[in-house]
Image (cartoon, rainbow, N blue to C red):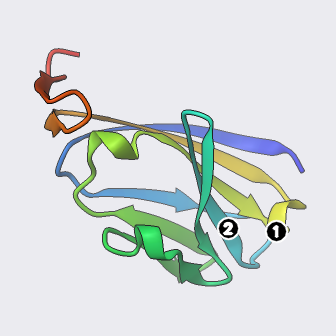
Amino acid sequence: MRIVERKWYTAYSGQKVVISCHPDRGNDVDWKYRAHGFVDYVYSNAVVYQRFRDRFEVKRGGGTFDLTIRSVNVNDTGQYLCIEEKGLGDIRINNLHVTGRYYSFKTFCFLDFSFI
C-alpha cells in the first residue's frame, strides 16, 4: 500500500464536484471520507453507503471511478481516499475544500467564508 497521487479541489457551497480516480488495476475501489479524525466509507463493493446516498454517487467506466457530490457544503470539506484492492493496493488522496455562505446550527450564527 502506497500513496501514489494527491490532488486538491476547491468548490463553493452548492456546486457539483466530480473527483476522478484512475486506478492502476482495473478492479473495484473503495472511496473513504476522512476529516477531523473521522473516517467513513463512502463507497465499497459497488455500493454508496446509506449516509452519503442523497448527494453522492460513483460512476464506473473505462477504468475510472468518478465520485460525484451534488450540492457540496462546507461539511464535505476533507479528504476523499480512493483505495485499490481493499487497502492492499495504491491510495489516491483527493483533498476537497468547500467555501461559501452557510448557516451553522452548531454555533447559531451566520458565517461568511467568501473572503478566503
Residue drawn where x is 32% and y is 73% of the image: 54
Towards the viewer: 11 or 41: 41
Task: Assess disc 1: are there few (<14), some (14-19) or many (≥20) residues with their C-alpha within 10 Å of its C-alpha.
Answer: some
The local secondary structure at tag 2 comes to strand
Which percent across, then down, holds residue 91?
Answer: 75, 51
Identify the mark nearer the N-term, 1 or 2: 2
Asked whether residue 30 appears in the rendered view, the answer is yes
Query: Which amino acid, mark 2?
Result: Asp
Which percent across, then down, holds residue 80?
Answer: 56, 50
Q: Which residue is mark 2?
A: 30
CB atoms at circles 1 and 2 under 8 Å apart?
yes
Distance between the alpha carbons at the discs numbered 1 and 2: 7 Å
Residue drawn where x is 56% and y is 83% of the image: 47
Query: How many numbered callouts?
Result: 2
Which percent across, then down, holds residue 37?
Answer: 62, 35
Query: Which amino acid, mark 1?
Result: Lys
Residue drawn where x is 51% and y is 60% of the image: 20
